[in-house]
Image (cartoon, rainbow, N blue to C red):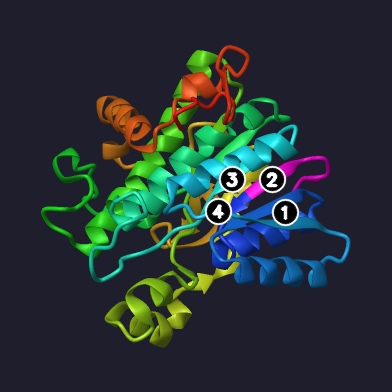
Amino acid sequence: MPSQHGRTIVVTGTGGLGFEDALALAHAGGDVIIAGRNPRKGSDAVARIKQSAPHASVSFEPVDLADLASVAAFGLRLRESRKRIDTLINNAAVMTPPRRQTTADGFELQFGTNYLGHFALTARLLPLLIRGRDPRVVTLSSVAVRRNAAINFDDLQAEKAYRPMPAYAQSKLACLMFALELQRRSDQAGWGLTSIAAHPGISRTDLLHNAPGRYSVQGLLRSALWFLFQPAAQGALPTLFAATSPDARGGRYYGPDRLSETRGYPSEATIPAVALDLHVARRLWDVSEKLADVDFASAAAPRLHAGPNGPGIPAEA
């Protein structure tokens, strides 16, 4: 990994892949901000990294991606306290709760947390990213998008019919489409961002235990068949490649290179055809800006759009 000295890096998620990302980036000299919902887990993650790398620059900042007000407050704190952000890793996720749950704003939990929270977070941090040094945004998708995933605009929040895995797959397809569309819009508007998507293959994290539960069918399979899942540190490699490698390219998708992209080392991943539909991508972006109450164009032009919530953020946000 190239040295990350002088780079300010935000990673969402306090455990699993997010922790492994933060640990590796801190070891490489980055100034790492771990962003998560649980202060206890955040403090524990910082302490573990400090134990491994005593001179690491790492801190925790609270943000609840399932609450757009929390995302806005986090963005405001960073815009007031930081001059720039060089890397943003949109990693945190929830996976397949057995019953439909909603965010603080009434969105289906997986769509609202995995995708819309990160969409809003990126907009809130865009003024800092634009001022970053070779800024990168890495957004996590999943191998689940290969299985008939689709953006269901007729039931985006799964209010008519909720099925855990299709809802999860939709949220992760939205993440992939966001990463690709962000690169296109950055290129068109001259924001200077490199936007990349990544996925971890099938890795041993707490997602299946934390969502359906340790004693659900999925949780029991995860526990009993642990040897089929690669370690979290291995699963983090495609994200770290996307975030740091000079060979990683904007508008691309990276994942493991073996066994149908379920394990191995970073390589370019196959983008499902559905994720390349430009009409759907533009429609999803427009819908998402309305749902999240953010405006990327305004956030990218802070001198023209300054309000009481900070540069580039409308006053009503």
**Dot 4 lies on which element?**
loop
Q: On the rendered structure, is 260 left or right of 12?
A: left
- The residue labelled by disc 1 is 25
**Dot 2 lies on which element?**
strand
- The residue labelled by disc 4 is 63
| Rendered image quadrant of residue 242 | top right
- Magenta part of the chain: 1-10
Q: On the rendered structure, is 89 left or right of 284?
A: right
What's the residue type where badge 3 is placed?
Phe
Local crowd at mark 3 within 10 Å, few (<14), some, or many (≥20)? many
Query: Which disc number belongs to residue 74?
Result: 3
| Residue at screen point 51% across, 49% down | 70
Circle 1/circle 2 CB separation < 8 Å: yes
Q: Which callout, 3 or 1, points at the residue further toward the start of the chain?
A: 1
What's the residue type where badge 4 is placed?
Val
- The residue labelled by disc 2 is 9
| Rendered image quadrant of residue 161 | bottom left
